[in-house]
Image (cartoon, helix red, strand yellow):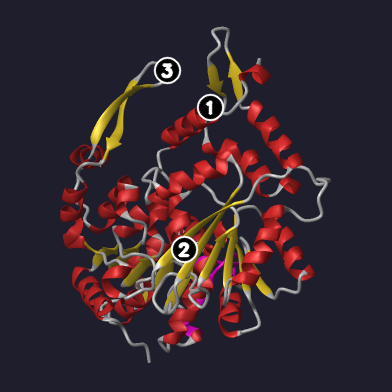
Amino acid sequence: MIKLFEHQKRHASFHLRKRKSCDFSEQGTGKTFTAITTMLHADDCDFAIIVTPKHLLYNWKNDLLKFNIPESEIFIADYDNLRKIDNFKTILGKYAVILINYDQFRINISSIVTFLTKNSVFIIADEAHAIGNPKTKITKAFLRASKYVKRLLLMTGTPISNSPEKVYPLMRMVAPGLYRNKKEFVYRYAIMKEIRTKGGRTIFIPDSWVGLPKLYKDIAPYSVRVEKDQVFDLPERIFVDRFIPLEKEQEKMYQKILIEMFYINEQGEMFLTVHKLAEFIRLRQVSSNPYLLEPNYPSDILEREKSLLEDIKNYDGKKVIFCEFVGTFNRLQELFKKNGIKYVAVRGGDKHISEKQEQFTKDESIEVFLGVRAACYTGLNLQVASTLINYELSFDLLMYQQSIDRIHRWGQKNKVVVINYYSSDIEQLILNVLKNKISNEREVLDLFRKKIEKSIDKAVLL
């Protein structure tokens, strides 16, 4: 029998009263159980469609089973299961609950809308920041469905302050009359900045969201939010930034790539040739795993790998290790095998995430959960571990915050240690960006340019 916390009971009652609403509660506060409880008490709905990222489909199934929903009434509309049926329409109305990912929801939106017009359906969207851009096909599909659905619950733990503009399409779905258009939404809460495009046009973009208190007030009648610290007495978090110097050959590779990113004009002014954060990928790769760029790199074991083995040995209990690149993911598995470290590993496309989570939780001999961050930063309950090692980092603040929430959540009984590895200017910049919660790409690029200008040798560029 599932026992809810008081905030979950309050939120479920709120969602039942409102019919269409949002849950902006922080990661790790139990939004999934709140949603399932709401669904089971929605007597005016005969069917439910739960939309979630691919890697969470089976997590949701396991949680539904905890509420004694028969497995025969649940259909997971993933690629393999959909290949076995002739037409998506045949499953609509056949199962009480359909679990589907965002892409399949978009692809089958016409059939879904037809079904919504003839039946009373509850749609739940998990990680709803995925529909935060009104221009994408997925968001347009949701907007279309929201006009016909009986009940709608949109869930995301992403702090509104991270991306206030993503609230607009969600409010269009749950409170269509709240804003006339996106322009009104933006001008109501943000100070605008005038910029000139390459084509000579003048446009206005949000410079600072000074109206967040008013935004919170305006959306309060249609949403709930609670933070972990408000409802749970969680242990403290300790952050350790571990500097691991680049090896000699690694440093040469790093400097070579760095020089390619700058040029000097006739006046002696230095310019950065990189215009997007994604273009820093080679610098990030050589900093953590030079084998990604040079398979014949002359070293059997990297200094960073030695530090990882030491941390695994020195910190008690189970550890969660996140990396960014699949090549690193594969190399670390070989490292663990050579050193007799028992582990489970999850990367994108893994259909057994739930089983591996359960393995890691229940098997005391498994010491490490290794994951590619993009596949693991949401939906997993890994609080059996109290140490998180960020072997590699990216600029994505949301992914960083939510990956920490995998272990710092309800049920955690021990002090949580988060260890961040860094070896170079680019990785130090990433750490500063994450700590200062900087998400503006132009600002990050400017910070990088200023930092590197102080250390790069102009004579080499000339």
Query: For the residues carrying marks 3 and 2, which lies nearer the camera in this image?
Result: 2
| Residue drawn at (50%, 70%) of the image | 380
As drawn, 148 above or below 8: above
Q: 266 or 8, which lies in front?
A: 266
Q: Quadrant of the C terminus?
A: top right
**Crowd band around label 2 with a 10 angstrom C-alpha radius: few (<14), some (14–19), many (20+):** many
Residue 216 percent across, percent down from the top left: 20, 54
Is residue 86 found inside the magenta-colored segment of the image?
yes
| Residue drawn at (46%, 69%) of the image | 416
Q: Earlier in the sequence, mark 3 or mark 2?
A: 3
Amino acid on which the number 1 mark rests in the picture: Lys
Single out the residue that lies furthest toward the top: 266
Q: Earlier in the sequence, mark 3 or mark 1?
A: 3
Q: Are marks 3 and 1 in contact (CB under 8 Å)?
A: no
Name the residue tied to disc 1.
Answer: 454
Amino acid on which the number 2 mark rests in the picture: Ile
| Residue range of the region highlighted in magenta in the rendering | 72-89
Q: 316 or 396, which lies in front?
A: 316
Give the CA distance from mark 2 to mark 1. Answer: 33 Å
| Residue drawn at (42%, 69%) of the image | 50
Residue 367 percent across, percent down from the top left: 63, 76
Q: 356 or 451, which lies in front?
A: 451
Name the residue tied to disc 2.
Answer: 404
The circle drawn on residue 199 is: 3
Give the CA distance from mark 3 to mark 2. Answer: 42 Å
